Image: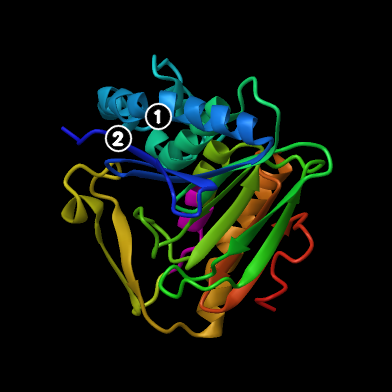
Amino acid sequence: MFALAQMALLPDGRRLHLNHGPIDLIIEAFGDPDEVKKSYEQAMSCFPEILPMLVSDLESLRQSYDVSWHPDGTVASRMQDACSRFSAEFVTPMAAVAGGVADEVLGALVCGRQLEKAFVNNGGDIAFHLTEGQSLTAGLIADYHLPTIDGECVLTHDMPVRGIATSGWKGRSFSLGIADSVSVLANNTASADVAATLIANAVNTDHLAIERISASEQDPDSDLGNRLVTVDVGALDQQTIDAALNAGEKAAIVAEQAGHISAAVLVLQNTFRVVGTAPVGLIAKAA
């Protein structure tokens, strides 16, 4: 069993830190101080139940998406719904877990409150709330192993985007592909999370510099079973990089044209591809 949830303001007095087992959130709300205080209380009220609910559904969440499954938990329902948009491909609801949690806590945070804007950052997958005239600037990290800000994404109230998520073989979760990172903008974070996972999987090709092992060797409980996941990518020639990015770009275009995402940024060894309508400044620092 996991220890009790930890919930406290950070030393800056502005941001709220929520931690429970593998879930680690940084939250900030903007507006009248009393409204912000009440919003934080609402987030803290819902948070301790999230992990136990996910654990109770874990066996089903690790299975390939099944349209006939209707989870009781609200986070699991968000994850299942996000996967339904990509049901033509192999995907388990676990692909949406970080985004689903961020969306759930954001929903509790803003419910009935008068806030100017707010965000919930779950390890780089970010759910956000914006009112008219407000904006949020998110940093783009092209390489998880070199955590520097390589670009800036300016998100505004009038954009059809309320979630951003990033995936890649160097990230927290296993990847079937070789992308250093794929960042996706979508109308919610759970959907962005699934799309980023699948597009990152699609950034793929064969090369002697790519090392893969079965997911079950890395983690016996992995939802990917014996599928091969990427554990190392050596230096690649430009032709190989382009071939892998072409495959990922094709997947991103399909998702964008279907209305599942608004934009995606694909990165492999300092080569970038952008799909969809990217906000101004998204890759300004990376260019």
User: Which mark, by number, is residue 100?
Assistant: none
203 within the magenta span:
yes
For residue 122, say whether it is visible: yes
> Label 2, label 1: how many angstroms apart (C-alpha)?
8 Å
- Horizontal and vertical percent for residue 65? 41, 30
User: Which mark, by number, is residue 5?
Assistant: 2
In the visual, does 214 lie left or right of 153?
left
In the visual, does 190 lie left or right of 287?
left
Seen in the picture, residue 72 relative to 179 is either above or below; the reply is above
State the residue at coordinates (32%, 23%): 53
Q: Quadrant of the C terminus?
A: bottom right
Seen in the picture, residue 198 relative to 168 is either above or below; the reply is above
SS for callout 1: helix
Viewer-side residue, 19 vs 212: 19
CB-based contact (under 8 Å), mark 2 and mark 1:
yes
Majority secondary structure of magenta residues? helix
- Horizontal and vertical percent for residue 110? 61, 28
Task: Count all numbered tags in the image, as a single digit.
Answer: 2
Magenta residues span 197-205
- Horizontal and vertical percent for residue 95? 42, 41
Q: Amino acid at mark 2?
A: Ala
User: Which mark, by number, is residue 47?
Assistant: 1
Seen in the picture, residue 108 relative to 166 is either above or below; the reply is above
State the residue at coordinates (51%, 47%): 15
